[in-house]
């Protein structure tokens, strides 16, 4: 029997890989997408319930303690959150299935009582743990398990945020900055698109992202203005990361008992809410972002959102950091951008993208986020603003387990990623 030539064998292997991952990624995208839809609806329901019954914020101390007790009862008191998902991809560390229901319930509870947290960071944990379980049941090897976890991360992010391209690239880019698993590109895209389609079947993400009424074309003056804003957003992203990370250390230093930390954190967020006089900074804050882009300006909003988020997540409440980062960037952008001569709404959108970039160290994902949230008009200026923020934000970031392989300032390697 005549053997196939080398190019023929390679083609067959490529076809086999493609068919395998079409099936696996579609399965992960569909299943994770369904759970993410339930998660999305649960968080929206919790936010609507708190809006209807504002007195629920008085349950903040009890909610913080309840979440701590829930994790302790499940043996997950020392859970590292999203950082564990990054380690699972990079070092093939096992993810526990119980992570999914825990982050599901605790994030909804956080939003119900008015903690300041997002949902997309929690989605990475939700999708990662569910897809790791699916990979285990499929008896995948270690390398394929990494890809399937990335698929789960992309699917959950896409179903919750409605940005499939950003979701696919972010899952690949966030783990190890400077080196991506390109073998996961097609699987992540299929998974993200399948999850988005699943979410749209339930009526989610039918409308495009955010309306930005006044984008401007690229020109020497606008490039300078955008670069200056990007530099300030880099500083803002550093402040956000430092404050949120140090909050948990300060809580642990002065309140060693985790249950008391949950009570104290809830009490502090409650007190701050009462002092502010509104629930503007409770929950994720997406409605406030839309108001800001539409023309509202609250000069102190970016600082208060950082404080609310640090007090919430540092004390043991669960949820994501990404929407609070977007809120912070938008609030800063609509206040500072016009000072530099940029239109109000456009500067808010620039602030969102650039602060997200500085906090996550994911420039390519940030550019795609700009495209999917705000449209393609003025995309070069979004890219420039994100690039400046990435460069000047140094090596700070939301996730301590994220590794930056190459220097931001010179074409040299900082360290290896463990492979």
Image (cartoon, rainbow, N blue to C red):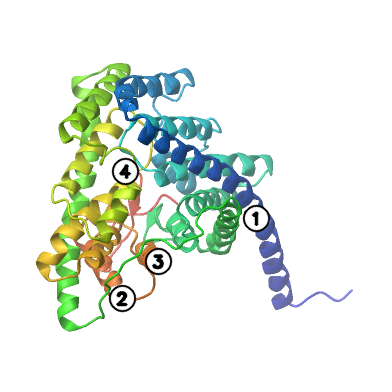
Q: Position of residue 2 (x, y in %)?
A: 86, 76
Q: Which residue is mark 4?
A: 400
Mark 4 residue element:
loop
Mark 1 residue element:
helix
What is the C-alpha distance between the residues marked 3 and 4?
Answer: 24 Å
Q: Tell me if residue 210 comes above or below residue 91 in the rendering.
A: below
What is the C-alpha distance between the residues marked 4 and 1?
Answer: 31 Å
Residue at image x 49%, y 43%? 40
What is the C-alpha distance between the residues marked 2 and 1?
Answer: 34 Å
Q: Position of residue 138 (x, y in %)?
A: 69, 44
**Number of the label disc, if any, that sits on residue 217:** none
Mark 2 residue element:
loop
Looking at marks 2 and 1 on the same chain, the residue that comes earlier in the sequence is marked by 1
Q: Which residue is mark 3?
A: 368
Which residue is at the front of the view, 225 or 407?
225
Furthest-right residue in this view: 1
Looking at marks 3 and 4 on the same chain, the residue that comes earlier in the sequence is marked by 3
Mark 3 residue element:
helix
Select label 3 or label 4 by which is in front.
Answer: 3
Which quadrant of the view contains residue 82? top left
Q: Tell me if residue 281 comes above or below residue 161 in the rendering.
A: above
What is the C-alpha distance between the residues marked 1 and 3?
Answer: 22 Å
Q: Position of residue 125 (x, y in %)?
A: 47, 41
Badge 4 crowding class, 10 Å Cα cut-off, few under 14, some 14 to 19, many 20 or more, is some
Does the rendering let one see residue 395?
A: no
Badge 2 crowding class, 10 Å Cα cut-off, few under 14, some 14 to 19, many 20 or more, is some
Q: Which residue is mark 1?
A: 26
Badge 3 crowding class, 10 Å Cα cut-off, few under 14, some 14 to 19, many 20 or more, is many
**Number of the label disc, if any, that sits on residue 378:** 2
């Amino acid at each position: 029997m005549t053997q196939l030539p080398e190019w023929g064998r390679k083609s067959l292997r490529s076809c086999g890989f493609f068919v395998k991952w079409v099936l696996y990624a579609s399965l992960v995208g569909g299943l994770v997408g369904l759970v993410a839809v339930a998660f999305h609806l649960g968080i929206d329901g919790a936010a609507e319930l708190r809006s209807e019954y504002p007195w629920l914020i008085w349950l903040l101390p009890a909610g913080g303690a309840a979440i701590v007790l829930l994790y302790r009862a499940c043996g997950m008191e020392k859970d590292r959150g999203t950082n564990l998902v990054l380690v699972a991809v990079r070092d093939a560390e096992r993810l526990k299935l119980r992570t999914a229901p825990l982050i599901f319930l605790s994030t909804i509870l956080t939003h119900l009582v008015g903690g300041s947290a997002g949902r997309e960071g929690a989605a990475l944990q939700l999708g990662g743990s569910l897809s790791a379980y699916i990979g285990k049941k499929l008896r995948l090897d270690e390398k394929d398990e990494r890809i399937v976890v990335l698929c789960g991360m992309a699917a959950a992010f896409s179903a919750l945020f409605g940005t499939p391209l950003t979701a696919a690239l972010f899952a690949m880019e966030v783990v190890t900055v400077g080196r991506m698993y390109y073998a996961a590109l097609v699987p992540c895209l299929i998974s993200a698109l399948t999850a988005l389609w699943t979410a749209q079947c339930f009526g989610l993400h039918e409308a495009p992202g955010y309306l930005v009424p006044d984008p401007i074309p690229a020109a020497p003056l606008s490039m300078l203005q955008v670069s200056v804003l990007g530099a300030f957003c880099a500083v803002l992203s550093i402040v956000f990361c430092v404050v949120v990370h140090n909050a948990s250390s300060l809580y642990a230093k002065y309140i060693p008992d985790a249950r008391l930390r949950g009570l104290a954190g809830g009490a502090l967020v409650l007190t701050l809410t009462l002092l502010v006089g509104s629930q503007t900074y409770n929950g994720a804050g997406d409605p406030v972002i839309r108001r800001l882009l539409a023309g509202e300006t609250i000069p102190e909003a970016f600082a208060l959102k950082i404080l609310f988020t640090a007090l919430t997540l540092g004390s043991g409440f669960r949820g994501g950091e990404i929407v609070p980062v977007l809120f912070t960037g938008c609030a800063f952008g609509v206040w500072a951008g016009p000072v530099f001569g940029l239109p109000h709404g456009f500067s808010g959108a620039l602030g969102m993208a650039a602060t997200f970039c500085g906090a996550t160290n994911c420039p390519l994902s940030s550019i795609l986020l700009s495209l999917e949230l705000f449209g393609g008009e003025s995309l070069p200026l979004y890219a420039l603003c994100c690039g400046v923020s990435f460069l000047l934000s140094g090596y700070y970031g939301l996730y301590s387990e994220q590794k930056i392989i190459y220097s931001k300032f010179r074409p040299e390697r900082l360290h290896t990623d463990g492979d």
